[in-house]
């Protein structure tokens, strides 16, 4: 591949060409994605407001749910406006630096989404299996022992993945078949061997998503065993666990499908790969706050109270 590097300079600007197969119908995508954007912003903002404003919701679990809302709120704010403008006005250009920044943020947010689910599983484990020591183990100094190593792991792994992309030469094409910069979507445009990039990408998925999933599963197996052994008294405690399992299943399924779609390509249309990768950013950010708001009793009550107060304020001038 050396002759390519001698004859062609590496591209510094790229074209995001996701859903180009739709042709003149591409602007129509603005409508469903805009609706999801508004739902995500509204639901996550409301969830954050309710948890922050209500002192009774300042428990470790609610703080973790607020952390998840912050993570879910970030992709729509960072990426969706640019994508919507692309659908409407055909603005598709992005620099290599901008692309690398997008990859870093996307993968870091995905890593913390997985890790927050693990922290929630630990919270439920301590609350259900060791209730007498819950406050002690969820106290900030103790809980930081679980937080800091995982934060360092996420930052190091994502930094390594992105730092290996920067030195690559992109001398064949500068068209990325995606709506935003994704790791493998950019790597596949490089000339020369990208085996190291693919390997490090797989390793990062193993050490983040797979390891987190293993510990989450182990935690819930122990929790369910403990509750089933304790009889009816513990069944109520599983309500929150079921909520977390629903969120975890949806989030990890979309992440896994988006990840595998770039490595298993047998007859899979490009638009399908782009769709799943886009849903990886948007769908959990719409789904998670609604599920937490509906299924977490204390949060649901405060959300309904907040909405009723807003409705009263709006109708008061006309009464």
Image (cartoon, helix red, strand yellow):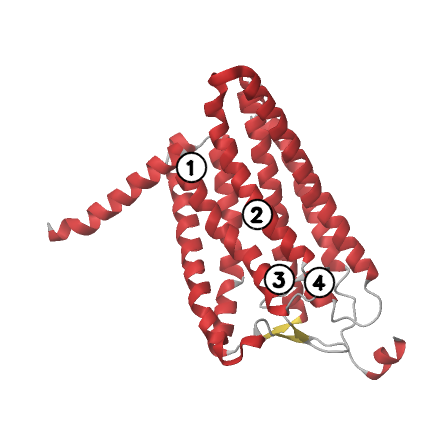
Mark 2 is surrounded, within 10 Å at the Cα level, by few (under 14), some (14 to 19) or many (20 or more) other residues, namely: many
Tell me which residue sits at (65%, 42%) in the image.
Answer: 151
Residue pointed to by mark 4:
184
Measured as percent of width and height from the top left, residue 120 is found at 56, 34
SS state under label 1? helix
Residue pointed to by mark 2:
251
Measured as percent of width and height from the top left, residue 149 is found at 69, 37
Lower sequence index among marks 3 and 1:
3
SS state under label 2? helix
Asked if residue 132 shows in the view, the reply is: no
Residue pointed to by mark 1:
295
Number of marks in the rendered image? 4
Q: Camera-side residue: 31 or 101?
A: 31
SS state under label 4? helix
The CA span between labels 3 and 1 is 33 Å
Tell me which residue sits at (39%, 36%) in the image.
Answer: 299
Residue pointed to by mark 3:
102
Lower sequence index among marks 4 and 2:
4
Lower sequence index among marks 4 and 3:
3
The CA span between labels 1 and 4 is 36 Å
């Amino acid at each position: 591949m050396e002759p390519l590097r001698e004859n062609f300079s590496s591209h510094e600007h790229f074209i995001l060409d996701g859903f180009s197969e739709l042709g003149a119908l591409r602007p129509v995508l603005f409508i469903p994605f805009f609706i999801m954007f508004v739902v995500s912003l509204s639901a996550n903002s409301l969830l954050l407001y309710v948890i922050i404003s209500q002192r009774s919701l300042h428990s470790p679990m609610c703080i973790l749910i607020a952390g998840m809302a912050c993570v879910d709120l970030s992709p729509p704010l960072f990426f969706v406006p640019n994508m919507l403008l692309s659908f409407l006005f055909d603005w598709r250009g992005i620099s290599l630096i901008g692309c690398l920044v997008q990859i870093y943020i996307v993968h870091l947010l995905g890593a913390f989404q997985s890790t927050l689910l693990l922290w929630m599983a630990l919270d439920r484990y301590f609350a259900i299996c060791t209730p007498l020591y819950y406050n002690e183990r969820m106290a900030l100094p103790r809980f930081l022992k679980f937080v800091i190593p995982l934060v360092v792991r996420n930052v190091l792994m994502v930094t390594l993945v992105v730092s290996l992309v920067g030195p690559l030469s992109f001398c064949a094409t500068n068209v990325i078949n995606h709506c935003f910069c994704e790791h493998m979507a950019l790597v596949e445009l490089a000339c020369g061997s990208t085996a190291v990039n693919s390997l490090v990408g797989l390793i990062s998925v193993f050490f983040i998503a797979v390891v987190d999933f293993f510990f989450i599963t182990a935690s819930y197996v122990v929790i369910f065993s403990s509750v089933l052994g304790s009889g009816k008294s513990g069944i109520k405690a599983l309500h929150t666990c079921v909520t977390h399992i629903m969120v975890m299943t949806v989030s990890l399924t979309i992440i896994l499908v988006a990840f595998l779609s770039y490595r298993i390509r047998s007859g899979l249309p490009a638009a399908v790969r782009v769709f799943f990768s886009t849903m990886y950013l948007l769908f959990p950010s719409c789904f998670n706050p609604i599920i937490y708001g509906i299924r977490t009793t204390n949060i649901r009550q405060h959300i309904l109270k907040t909405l009723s107060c807003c409705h009263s304020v709006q109708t008061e001038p006309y009464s």
